[in-house]
Amino acid sequence: MPTARQLVEELEKLSPDERLQVIDQVIHDTIEPHPEIESIWVREASARWEAFERGDVTVRSYRDVMEKYRT
């Protein structure tokens, strides 16, 4: 079995998207979500998406948001 360091070295060879897929899978396999918290997040995400679709939220680009923190 490879060591943690060997695994990290292999991960570093992957693209950022592939790394995220691996990280997501490791988290999914390691942490069991709390059903109540998951339910709350599903409702919140749905409410945010619906507000976006209705045009009730102001949309800003990533660049604009990050500019606030660079100065």
Image (cartoon, grey):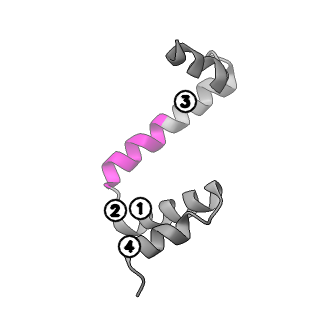
Specify the label residue 48 is tagged with.
Answer: 3
- Quadrant where the N terminus sits is bottom left
- Report the amino acid beneath label 3: Arg
Please give the residue where the numbered disc 2 appears in the rendered image: 31
- Residue extent of the magenta highlight: 34-44
Label 4 is placed on what type of residue?
Answer: Ala
| Mark 2 / mark 3, whichever is N-terminal | 2
Q: Is residue 45 left or right of residue 54?
A: left
- Residue ID for mark 4: 4
* Disc 1: which residue: 27
Count of labels in the image = 4
Residue under the point 57% across and 60% down: 19
Q: Mark 2 and mark 3: span between their CA atoms?
A: 25 Å
Residue 63 position, x and y percent, is: 65, 23
Determine the CA span between mark 1 and mark 3: 24 Å
**Are dots 4 and 2 in contact, CB under 8 Å?**
no
Could you tell me if the residues under marks 2 and 3 are in contact, i.e. CB atoms within 8 Å?
no
Q: Nearer the viewer, mark 2 or mark 3?
A: 2
Q: Is residue 37 visible?
A: yes
